[in-house]
Amino acid sequence: MPVDIYLNVAVGGILTGLVYGLMALGLSVIFGVVRVVNFAHGEMMTMAMYIAVTLFGAFHLDPLTMMVPIAAVMFAFGYLLQVRLINPFVTRPEYMQFLLLVAVAIIIINSLLIIYGPDARNVQTSYSYDSFQIGPLIVDATKLYAGIAAVVVAALLFGFFRYTRQGTAIRACADNYTGALVVGLDVKHLYALTFGVGAACVGAAGTMLLLIFDVTPSAGPAYTLLAFVIVITGGLGSMVGALIGGVLIGFTEAMAGLLFSPSAKSMFAFAILVLVLLFRPQGIMGKRTA
Amino acid sequence: MIARLIADIPPRGLALFGALLVALIAAPIFAGDYLLTVLIVILYFAYVGQAWNIMMGFVGQLSLGHALYVGLGSYIAAALFVRFGVGPWWGLVVAVPLAAAVGACIGFLAFRFRVAGVYFAILTIAFAEFARVGFDHLQWTGGSGGLFLPVTQYSYNDVWRLRGHPVMFYYILLAATALAFVLCRALLQSRVGYFWRAIREDEEAARSAGIDTFHYKMLAVVISAAMTSFAGVIYAFYYNNLFPEQVFHILRSIEIILGPIVGGVGTLFGPILGAFLLTGLAETLTAALAALGIDLPGAKQVFYGICLLLVVTALPEGVWPWLSRRIGLTERKT
Amino acid sequence: MSHQQKTEGARITRRTRSAGLGAAAVAGVTPFNIVRAQGAALKVGVILPRSGYLAGIGQDCQRGVDIATGVLKDLGMPALQIMNADTESNVETARSRAEKLIGEGAQALVGAFDSGQSSAIAQVAEQKGIPFIINIAAAPPITEQGYKFVFRNFPTAPMILRDAFIDQKEVFAAVGSAPKTAVFMHVNDTFGTAMAGGIGAVMPKFDMPYKIVQEIAYDPAARDLSVEISKAKATGADALLMVSRLNDAILLTRELVKQRWTPMAIFSMGPGWYEDQYLKTLGKLSDGPLSFAPWYDPNKKLSKQLEAALAKLSAAINLNTNHVYTFEALLIAADAYKRAGSADPTALADAIRKTNITDNASIGPGIQFDAKGQNDKIVGGAIQNRGGKLITVAPKAAAIGKAEWPLTPYDKRA
């Protein structure tokens, strides 16, 4: 096969991987700080995607410009969800958290089915079919924009956690729960804030992904699984790790599909996951915990 | 031996249990075919939930990929039947050790490398996904086109080949569930059970007390996998068709664990109660929505999700602990 | 894939009185409907995947049910009382729904689109002696079990393949040219694998003018098909031979555009490329692909009636396989009921076996069943997307237009 095929596939895989990474960022934040197994992660993303679809249909607003308001809506949703429903479960066993969020996921998926029907929805922007040609390389425009947006949002998030008071407080909670309490941090509020931030993140990712993929009511679970794989591979609690994990998974899947059989693509992602779990459980960028 | 098994159970509990058993044995006589089908599904989930509970409730290992063992049991027994005419009971002899071996591999990998909690759960998901994609490409068992078992007759019950009326499957599953229940009780009362509970409570402490935690965790995984694969064999011969996409799917794994979690993880009766409650809830919701004339696909699932939400928020330990307190059975918390 | 049209009134909210509620204890035996007036309607249970991952198709099949009542009445057929059920895209649920419907008095069953779910229902139907008419399901084993109560008015995968090749040759002859090489892409699910498996056996018999240079299988749950299209483009083949579903069809077309590859022709042997969602989503980019699938004959009178009825239900929807075949399943039930004169299931099954409806909608001589309960007379058609409409181009008897290729390059379409 000519070299440029490999190049094209690789670039496509990396760009898609960046957006997967952004989606996983939200989970990394939630899981890393609040330690809740958010099995409704993918559903939160599909919610955001459907909101974007509705806004686009009604007002013809480009998803990229709607990213901020949708993220804000998802922030509110995440905050409320954590405060009202999830908070008591933070200290409960994982299987309880799992069941709670599975129930939430079931409700969201089927409500979306009732409201929007089962057909796949998408948005057709003016640049939906554009691609840039640089020599032998053909780069999909939507993937490029989405990839860039993902990096920007990730940088913003990084800045938030590094340089703001709230961000630092949240990191403190994650590192040492008791210590945070002792110091007088309002942990409940901070947890809710984190969940909100994570949800906002996944909402932004959803709006971007809508440019590339369609949304159906049952699209969520596959993304949830993907997010967990990326978070674990990249390293819990590491933002850069989530992006790297996303890129790695995106790249591997693309190349595996090219070199082997496309229908076995997902096996490779899981194989990487298993290897990481066994040999480097803290992930690529994670810190080894005590 | 029986005395030891029933020690500590208040007479009222024994009486209730006995009554339930009698009711279940007599059920087919009174139940219509639809209700029989529902009961078969309930017993299937009660049995598999019980098997899963051994890993989670007794030893604290969250498995989200239990469909793997169901699928292995199903496919091995079905393939042997379709390709070589080997009856299901012989198929069991092959399928169960194989499933147990796979469980052992997963357990070995996980425990040797200290994979625990959510990570362990994700590991189990990964293996189930491997199986799904793997079987999708395995032409010998039909690949993604599916494996169909030849259905010969319904007029008489051929227990040896598991061909016949659903009633036959009902009693087999009932016997299996009852035996699983007794087995779990016996295990819990034994040395193994005490060590398991110690590991569940605090693995570090158990290890420092000299318990070989690796050995006992492996035991739990292997027993759980082996028991689950039996259900897989029954599944294959009852539904008579298998597709990797359906059998190994993560939704199947989730279905398996809903019952025990709702009923009460770690309790003996929890998985059984959970299976009754959830399947009953699903069927009742469907009937209720139909009676109200609401014909909206997805509505039943929304209500189902809401009920799950309410139960899990209100009863954090599961329904059985709460129920047993209410009806005055102080079952010792296992 | 087949579409049955249902007339609107057929989907009735069941007016079961009261006591069905909280019926766990009495489960399954909700009180029968108050007996209808004379000429009791035949109770037909329609089981489709109306939620879950197959929801889109199940709800499309439902449209075939919705238009059935009116059209059947116009044909002078006896009335049907439709009892709807949802398999939730799940084998276990399919089975228990079938049991429940039979328990509530269903005298015939229709369903269920998916081969696995249909197989589960078939077992229940056979065991209870209730006729089960499959609207859509292509896996051969279902009618190989020696069932006496299961009937399938839909071609099996080998039949679909065979007709696809026959129609392709006809189209090549009509257009006067043919591709020399083709890359075969298929989704790795039940239908796709059956078709892929069949190609090796069936294709050589037809001496096709093109060679398959590569076979690419992809995951049905795939979100991103850019790699697959890259591989296909790299083969440099003339034509793209496809077996896919709706969502993949849309994804693949988008990738074709983005990667700037327009094959000479796209031959789809299955669903997706002709569906409304495809046409609506892609607009001008949807023109050109040829689909070889079980289809209705636009020249037949019943087809025109179905088109009219569907247009009344919703103007934006094209009549398609899902609607037509679901309707025909109900037609078979009504016709058998008329001939049998009784709703006794065995009499019905015997009547169905003797079915001979020549005034049907799907292509072919009509609806008849062989000893296995399979309608082996169905002929597949070829349709081409043009301007948001579907033009039947083969076989000759059903054609209302001529096929055209090569495809207009995607980047030249406004």
Image: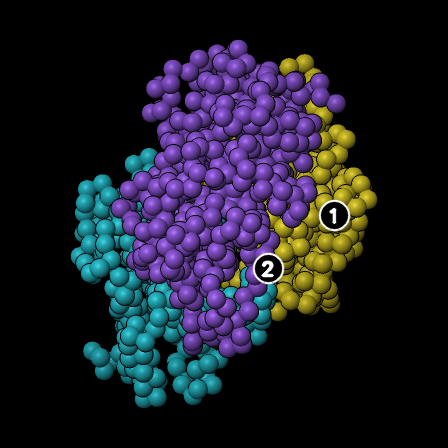
Chain colours: A yellow, B cyan, C purple
* Residue in view at x 33 percent, y 47 percent: C353
> What residue did someone put label 2 on?
B296
- Spot occupied by residue B141 in the image (x, y as percentages of width and height): 31, 40
- Give the vertical position of C166 relative to B264 (above or below): above
- Give the vertical position of B220 relative to C228 (above or below): below
Number of residues whose C-alpha sits closer than 10 Å to that of mark 1, classed few (under 14), some (14–19) or many (20 or more): some
Amino acid type, callout 1? Thr
Amino acid type, callout 2? Leu
Given residues C202 and B25, the one toward you in this image is C202
Q: Mark 1 — on which chain does it sit?
A: A
Given residues B122 and C222, the one toward you in this image is C222
- Give the vertical position of B256 relative to C372 (above or below): below
Element carrying mark 2: loop
Left or right relative to A86: residue C372: left
Given residues A129 and C151, the one toward you in this image is C151
Left or right relative to B94: residue A100: right
* Residue in view at x 46 percent, y 63 percent: C39
* Residue in view at x 59 percent, y 65 percent: B294
* Residue in view at x 63 percent, y 42 percent: C308
Q: Mark 2 — on which chain does it sit?
A: B
- Spot occupied by residue C87 in the image (x, y as percentages of width and height): 47, 55
> What residue did someone put label 1 on?
A54
- Spot occupied by residue C229 in the image (x, y as percentages of width and height): 56, 25
Given residues A52 and C167, the one toward you in this image is C167
CA gap between label 2 and label 1 equals 21 Å
